[in-house]
Amino acid sequence: MEFIYKKLKDYSASDFYGFHMPGHKRSARLTGADLPYGIDITEIEGFDDLHHAEGLLKRAQERAASVYRAEETHYLINGSTVGLLSAVLGSTRRGERILMARNCHKSVYNAVLLNELKPVYVYPRLLDGMELNDEVTPREVGRLLDQNPDIRVTVITSPTYDGVVSDIKGIADAVHRRGGILILDEAHGAHFGFHPMFPENGNMQGADIVIHSLHKTLPALTQTALLHMNGGRADRERVRMYLHMLQSSSPSYVLMAGIDECIRMLEERAGEVFGQYAELLEVARERLEGLNRLKLVETERYDRSKIVVSTAECFEKKENKKFTGKCLYDLLNEKYFLQMEMAAASYIIAMTSPADTKEGLGRLVSALYEIDGELAGHDSKEGFYPGPGHDSCLRRGRAAHKGEKDGEDGENGKSGEKEPAINEQVYPPGQAADLENRECISLGECGGRVALEYAYIYPPGIPLTVPGERVSAGTAERLRQYSSAGLHVEGTKTRGKIEVLTDG
């Protein structure tokens, strides 16, 4: 069997001299940098072409499809972003309507703007006391599709950036019963399907197009991802066309070799690697359930690779102020040299992967217990191991509703949730982008005005305002709270301000 990395290493060690791109000529002679120049090549003899794969890369992508139980798989070297853009643009026609989860990634919103689509949003509820989106339900998707029978394409994000998982099989059934196509942004779920601790991946649950970011949760290089297609509903040829248009015409062989090595690991060692990972993760999560003031967060359907710790019940006595997610994030970074993935107003996210070590997870657990002890005013080691029956884990969502059905017949409302802040759509995003009468105002003053810019916290890049929307009072308040908590609102041209329609 031929693997990309091995072939590149053999070529690098050979006597071939290249009169072709790239300009470093497979050598660090001029820069002295410790970079993989030796295996960074272009489409030369024997190495195939990603945009017209017939040999090495065709076989590599077929292996990836087999590992992920997909019918067709494409390498992405421009991240999940290019996969989502290609999936949406290839599946929709200009100007039509699309159903999308409001917590979709900004790349989906960019596809909406590029194809002048008219979005209809399915809003996940917010978990009470936290700015954390819960799952999207099949019932809500079905209801909105019934109200909007012209919609053909639905886009859902699961797992979310925060680790919340939706019932993808139920949603796929709801979409397919109405003749539609389901695009699943499973970027944060590339590790799904390899161990019972995690759900099956979207290919195994009926999604028509699935996007995975290998680099997010697996040992792969940044920018590497996969796009999978299944069944006969999606227009595969149009999706391929957009992939050819939007992906770099000079795909990095270093990145593609990284994808192939990751797939090789999954193919040959997934059982061993994920068995060890699940064991380490289970121990860490059990210990974190004994926290006092800080709380480990999870919903009924949850990606347990994400360690989300809530500060909602914490107060800093010395400073006489709330102990926010940003406070915890900064403390872990500055005192314990632990870099978290993200801070929100009331929680932090620690992303784990099979590459994590016992030592690394142990450092995180110990640091959180020390901080928790200081917040609670007792010895940091107290309660390190939870006693019998102890459960201070912040469990949210549907776990309390025993016997509740999945799918469209299940309950829609849940305890511990509140309605999200919903903005009124005045103009489609594509039309709003062309409006000229605009002024720049403070984020805190944008309530009731028609936004002409995106505003979001990055990561994860989920818009709070979309061009053409009249900003609700709730959204304006969230923006104000984020700014007060020290979180940077991005997407606008001027920090702390947003462009709005002058007379709207």
Image (cartoon, rainbow, N blue to C red):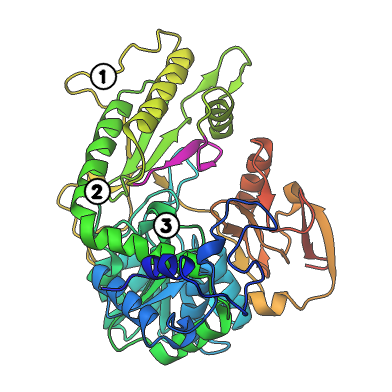
106 in relation to 333, above or below? below
Res 91 seen here: no
Q: CA distance from mark 2 to mark 3?
A: 15 Å
Q: CA distance from mark 1 to mark 3?
A: 34 Å
Quadrant in which residue 307 is drawn? top left
- Secondary element at image label 1: loop
Q: Amino acid at mark 1?
A: Tyr
**Which numbered tag is attached to residue 147?**
none
Q: Amino acid at mark 2?
A: Val
Q: Amino acid at mark 3?
A: Ala
Which one is earlier in the sequence, the residue at label 1 or at label 2?
2
In-image side of 457 versus 52 (left or right): right
Residue under label 2, please give it.
Answer: 273
Q: Nearer the viewer, mark 1 or mark 2?
A: 2
Q: For residue 345: magenta?
A: yes
Quadrant in which residue 248 is drawn? bottom right
Which one is earlier in the sequence, the residue at label 1 or at label 3?
3
Position of residue 324 measured from the top left corner of the image (x, y, whole percent): 56, 30
Which one is earlier in the sequence, the residue at label 2 or at label 3?
3
In-image side of 133 versus 392 (left or right): right
Check disc 3: other Cα within 10 Å, few if <14, some if 14-19, many if 20+: many
Residue under label 1, please give it.
Answer: 385
225 in relation to 198, above or below? below
- Secondary element at image label 3: loop
Q: Residue at x 27, y 43 (%)?
A: 277
Position of residue 305 measured from the top left corner of the image (x, y, whole percent): 33, 45
| Residues shaded magenta | 339-353
Res 281 seen here: yes
Residue under label 3, please give it.
Answer: 220
Task: Out of 311 and 227, give the one closest to the viewer.
Answer: 227
